[in-house]
Image (spheres, grey):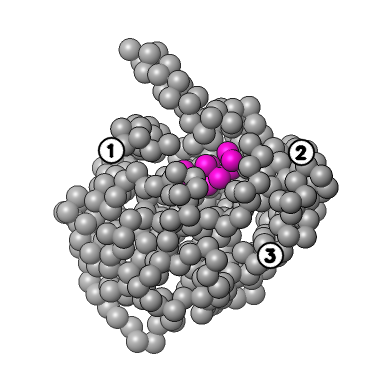
Amino acid sequence: MEFWEKAMDGLEMNTLFSNIYKNKTVLITGHTGFKGSWISLWLKKLGAKVVGYSLPAPTDPSHFELLNLDIVSILGDIRDKKKLVQTFTDYKPDIVFHLAAQTLVRYSYKNPIETFETNVMGTINILEACRHTPSVKAVVIVTSDKCYENKEWIWGYRENDPMGGHDPYSTSKGCAELVTGSYRSSFFNPDEYKKSHNTLIASCRAGNVLGGGDWAEDRIIPDVMRAVSKNEKVIIRNPHAIRPWQHVLESLSGYLSVGQKLLEGKKEVAEAWNFGPVNEDYIEVEKVVNHIKSHWNKVQYEIQINPTNFHEANILKLDYSKAYTKLKWKPVWHGSKTFEMTTMWYRMFYEKNTILSSSDLDTFINDARKKNIE
């Protein structure tokens, strides 16, 4: 029975993304982080030769270390241009997914120089390495929904809205988008594809991703789960903030879809893309915590609003109409399912020492098929 289940699992994976990733060398920066570990798992199941380049796992526990994936894992800083270029030279990737970043808003206030060096110069180093590596045919630069100039309005931002940012993190992500656009126009112009170069570049912006295995600081789900593990109340500092909540696999499915199209030489995809949830999944932080609590009654919280806290946006929405129309992409799991799957991952980890990541991925793929989502 187990043999046939694995065989069917392999057949399912072979039909995803036109099987484009099988035997491709895929370089992932930030593979030891939350998103990076999940996309490493998915690409490994797709049959890719995964090469990761990142700082050591940023948290303990670490999702990446728990997965124990059979991939090439190189510990390095994207600000270390020499080591980065050597990695490209040694492994000759076909496609690059750039996820390495300083990802926290409040940390960026305390460490603005590090944030800009990592998120702006780090992205430039990646693009330079790609520019001088002939094997690279596709590049997906992952930034953030916070790259937009946030006017705190109720409409979702579109890909052609202005870049901006109040805090250093948001501004650095806006800068990374501008840098990516500059390199695309100057060195990887789609109009010159197959003439003066053979590389297509896109950037991707996603919402607030949830899912098992995230233990980063200053994120609501990890904060909740850490508190539960210690039988403590979690402190909610911004209960009415509205965010685009989505499972991590939603955004990764978008990144992989973009990567597929780039590898297929579809130069019209070499631009910016939003991947966000349906409108009903833009809800307040306190409501998210109560959703989690409904699946794990050990969750307890306390609201402590500190007026001296650094500025954080109160509302932020993404419009994914472009991805829906041109990529046929749309969310698989809506909010209630996302919160359930996320909570059960942590609950099984803390109560049973079980890692559900692989089975969660299989469930996500099966649910997408049931809904006829490509």
Residue reaching furthest to the bottom: 308
Q: Is residue 190 left or right of residue 269?
A: right
Residue 197 appears anywhere in the view: yes
SS label for mark 2: loop
Image disc number at residue 288: none
Task: Specify few, some or many for label 2: CA neighbours under 10 Å numbering under 14, 14-19, or 20 or more.
Answer: some
Q: Position of residue 80 (x, y in %)?
A: 74, 57
Part of the protein shown in magenta: 253-261
Q: Amino acid at mark 2?
A: Ser
Q: Amino acid at mark 3?
A: Val
Secondary-structure class at tag 1: helix
Please say whether residue 37 is visible from this viewpoint. Answer: no
Compute the Cα span from label 1 to label 3.
Answer: 45 Å
User: Where residue 352 is drawn, which disc sits there?
Assistant: 1
Nearer the observer, disc 1 or disc 2?
Answer: 2
- Closer-to-camera residue (311/345): 311
Q: Residue at x 76, y 38 (%)?
A: 135
Q: Which mark is residue 135?
A: 2
- Which circle's residue, 2 or 3, is located before the other in the chain? 2
